[in-house]
Image (cartoon, helix red, strand yellow):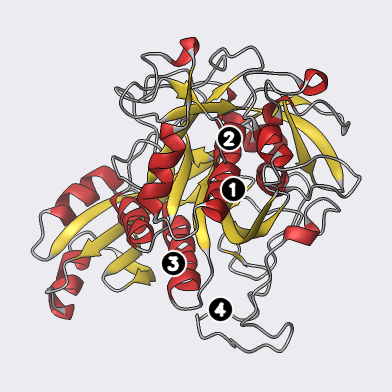
Amino acid sequence: MALACLLSLAGPARSSSVPDELLVQFAPHSTESAREAALSGVQARVLQTLRPGLLRVALAPGLSTDAAARQLGRQPGVAFAEAHVVYRPLAVLNDPYYLNGSLWGMEGDQDPDHFNPFGSQAARAWAQGHTSCGDVAVAVLDTGAQHPHPDLRANHWRNPGEIPGNGIDDDGNGLIDDVDGWDFAHNDNTVYDDPVEDLHGTHVSGTIGARGGNGRGVVGVCWKLQLLTVKFMDAGGGTSANAVRAIDYLIDLKTRHGLRLVAINASWGSAAESKALKQAIQRAGEAGILLVAAAGGSGNDNDTQPMYPASYPLPTVVAVTSIDAGGALGPRANHGAQSVDLGAPGEGIWSTVPRGGYAQLSGTSMAAAHVSGGLALLAQRARGADALALKQQLLDATTPTPALTGLTLTGGRLDLRGF
């Protein structure tokens, strides 16, 4: 049952939110008394302060969240009030067996033994000696991940500012012993909890950066890099409040602690828009962090039926759809001539899964992971380039693809041969 929930976006996209809760953003000039008056008008109580002025509140049972949001939005000093959105992974389980298979998404057109012109051409970059992404970091904002997996543990980021197990917030970020990242879904420092619940994040992580050249399993786009696990989803999905907290955590790691964080992989989504999440992604962009977002798996045109966060019209969002090994658009992959940037391998992708295994998943989740790995590879070569320059180089390098013509902004697919 939990597995079905985890992989639930095989069909039409569904929007959901936390019952009887809202996120409320107050303007900087609002007074404490004005805030209390606005909240009392809808019988709301504060559950959590996500950041200054942004509150997660609980409503009295039976009160419509839509009506409460509209009423709050009209109050003086309220910037916005919105549903507390729930996001879910965007992937479909194709094969339950933990078997190794062909990594067509890494292949290209240069090697007759590993020939697939619709692959990412990562193998060509490797053949040119570009296997390591050095100290570049990519954050997997997702379910948890089995970071001790034999193919992941060598690339797993550990917080140099924390002393493990001493019960002290050594780096001063408000979180105790966040040595391996943080679990915002359960509010603890254990970022791997369950092999079913954390399957999706483990699979995405392997495509980005499973260790190469170690004689086992699969290989990610980057053979060596820093994979940062930030969990905000469990088997039931993840909320916008926890996504905001997680993104601010990552911004702090980059701006205050010097982590060379290039991208956040967001292989999840919802049809519901969140202004709080949009603002968090804007803050990340201002800090030089790209957000690579899966376009969604409901077969929709995102130009008319948006999927968030992929559909936020922000310059540092990279929206990715899925293609198969024959270059066709994935059977359920969302598209958008204006709102989806490019395609990437996403159908029948083998990668790491919990318990040290390997399995095949399909969806725009897997496509986004290829792009995140590609950005890390590009960042290592184009050292000093800012986030917008990296995104532009990525898009400029795409290869025109008939199945994507008129369905994505570039009309092309990921091509790493020049990376």
Q: CA distance from mark 1 to mark 4?
A: 30 Å
**Are the two marked residues, 1 and 4, in contact with CB atoms closer than 8 angstroms?**
no
**Are the two marked residues, 1 and 3, in contact with CB atoms closer than 8 angstroms?**
no
| Callout 1 amino acid | Leu
Nearest to the observer: residue 346 or residue 46 = 346
Can you tell which mark lies on residue 251? Answer: 3
Quick one: label 2 or label 4, which is nearer the N terminus? 4
At which x and y percent is residue 209? 69, 49
Quick one: label 2 or label 1, which is nearer the N terminus? 1
Residue where numbered disc 1 is placed: 377
| Front disc: 1 or 3 | 1
Residue where numbered disc 2 is placed: 416
Residue 193 lies left or right of residue 92; in this view the side is right
Quick one: label 1 or label 3, which is nearer the N terminus? 3
**Are the two marked residues, 2 and 1, in contact with CB atoms closer than 8 angstroms?**
yes
Nearest to the observer: residue 215 or residue 302 = 215
Can you tell which mark lies on residue 175? Answer: 4
Q: Which image quadrant: the C terminus?
A: top right
**Are the two marked residues, 2 and 4, in contact with CB atoms closer than 8 angstroms?**
no
Secondary structure of the residue carrying tag 4 is loop
State whether residue 13 is above or below residue 211. Answer: above
| Front disc: 3 or 4 | 3
Viewer can see residue 334: no
Residue 238 lies left or right of residue 31; in this view the side is right
**Residue lying farthest front?**
128
At which x and y percent is residue 326? 64, 12
State whether residue 194 is above or below residue 228. Answer: above
Q: CA distance from mark 2 to mark 3?
A: 27 Å
